[in-house]
Amino acid sequence: MKKNIFAKKIGFYIILVIAWQAISMSDVWPNNIFPSPYEVAEDLVYTAADGSLFYGIGTSILRLAVGLAIAITGGVVLGIFMARVETVNQTIGSLVLGLQSIPSIAWVPLAILWFGLTDSGIIFVTAIGAIFAVTINTYTGVKNIDPHYIEAARNMGAKGSQLITNVLIPAAFPYMISGFKQGWAFAWRGVIGAELLFSFLGLGFLLNIGRQLNDVSQVIAIMLVIMMIGIAVDGFIFKKLEDKVMSRWGLR
Amino acid sequence: MKMAKLETKGIVKYFKHESHQLKALGGVDLKVEDGDFVCLVGPSGCGKSTFLRIVAGLETPDEGDILFDGKPLTTTGPERIMVFQEGALFPWLKVKDNVEFGLKMAGIPKDERAQISKRYLDMMQLTKFANSFTYQLSTGMRQRVAIARALVMDPDVLLMDEPFAALDAQTRDLLLIEMQLIWEKTKKTILFVTHNVAEAAVLGTKVAVFSNRPSKIKKLLPNDFKRPRVAEDENLLGFQQEILAELRPEVKKAK
């Protein structure tokens, strides 16, 4: 079964590349507008060989990691407060819903004014793009905890921060993972978007350079890298974590 | 006369029912001596589980007092440990860590926790499953873990809310025997809510029959048959009839 699906996928991508090659060879568009897969691959090898690709990936991922760590910490704390303190939910909760509707890229002008063209500015955009998704999922998770868990824990003497770390967070974890997953997706878009506009280092920066040099193959090559990192993080980190948690929590 | 281990005086509790208030508990008076095994039976919806939750300190009564060793109680505490119907085990912890949960909260060091939990894992025949997660266990096994988790706290009073309701008949019969052994071994005071008259007759030293809403304790029936008892014991059938005779009119009223 699994083999079959894998074969289908491989087949699809082979056909896709062949079709791409065919279109680029048919001279409908000139090669500098619509490069062949070979040219894109070549570009990828060049940027990899001179190190700029890996430097770009490293820079973007570092910014993402710091921003996401801030978003997860802040979002979890805020989400728990909203779920456990009704006043916080009625006040800050409504603001969170509003702020979540702002695309992260719309924070860029503010980030530039506050932080200048710095790493902190990009991290700010990344974190703020992700934090509200984490907050809302944590809130939902804590709200949906089986009340018997909390009662049993209190009955056995759990209080205050003990209750939070030993019961609320693990019990809400299946929801929180969805929040982290959404948060990561927002953060990844935020990093690349901010790098495009801030224009120094990172994959977004390499995209921009490609545009400035009229180098379509580089633009497509970097886009492929962005996509593959996305697939890798979703598939290897979040999917595995989610599967493990869902089965252990008895939800599957 | 010696002081009761646990005494409730005039416990009243209202439920919110749509727009009006429904008087569920209409003044429950109960005296439980140290080492008693009291089974609480009553028509469904009479509030016997709510009463147990009030004794556990998980709900507050609208009127009335709970005295523990003569002192009034208001909050929940580890001297009265509850075993929930579905166990309420933590799926993110291994069996062993579930059992040690209360000890961890009390700040007992890891080695000591392991020693204590080992004793109760052995008692409940869970040693093999110490490192399993709860989703890997059958319902019966989970209830064993829930009981072990409660016993580890060494509570004065064990509060059990229909703990065997979700079990198949064979598993239930086994646990009914074991529950009697545990009670004899540990000398715990136990309050045990059930809707199953046979279960109450097998387990209890006393059976408290709740009336229909607003409920009170209609009758406290003593049960001195020798142990271990089994549900099919003919000598117990008469006692079951006695319970049913009190219970039936209340169930009819409830309809």
Image (spheres, coloured by chain):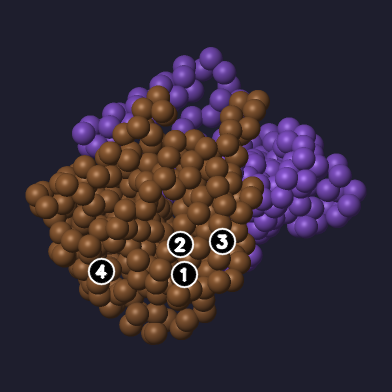
Chain colours: A purple, B brown
Q: Mark 4 and 1 residues: CB-CB less than 8 Å, in contact?
A: no
- Disc 1 marks a residue whose amino acid type is Ala
> From the viewer's perspective, is residue A16 above or below residue B227?
above
Q: Is residue B240 left or right of residue A29?
A: left
The residue positioned 64% from the left and 48% from the top of the image is B62
Q: What residue is disc 4 on?
A: B182
Q: Earlier in the sequence, mark 4 or mark 1?
A: 1
Q: What residue is disc 1 on?
A: B4
> From the viewer's perspective, is residue B235 above or below residue B34?
above
Which residue is at the front of the view, B113 or A31?
B113
Q: Is residue B48 left or right of residue A63?
A: left
Helix, strand or loop status at disc 1: loop
| Residue B14, quarter of the rendered image | top right
Q: Is residue B135 visible?
A: no
| Residue furthest to the right | A113
At which x and y percent is residue A198? 78, 47
Q: Is residue B237 visible?
A: yes
Q: Are marks 2 and 3 on the same chain?
A: yes
Q: Chain of mark 1?
A: B
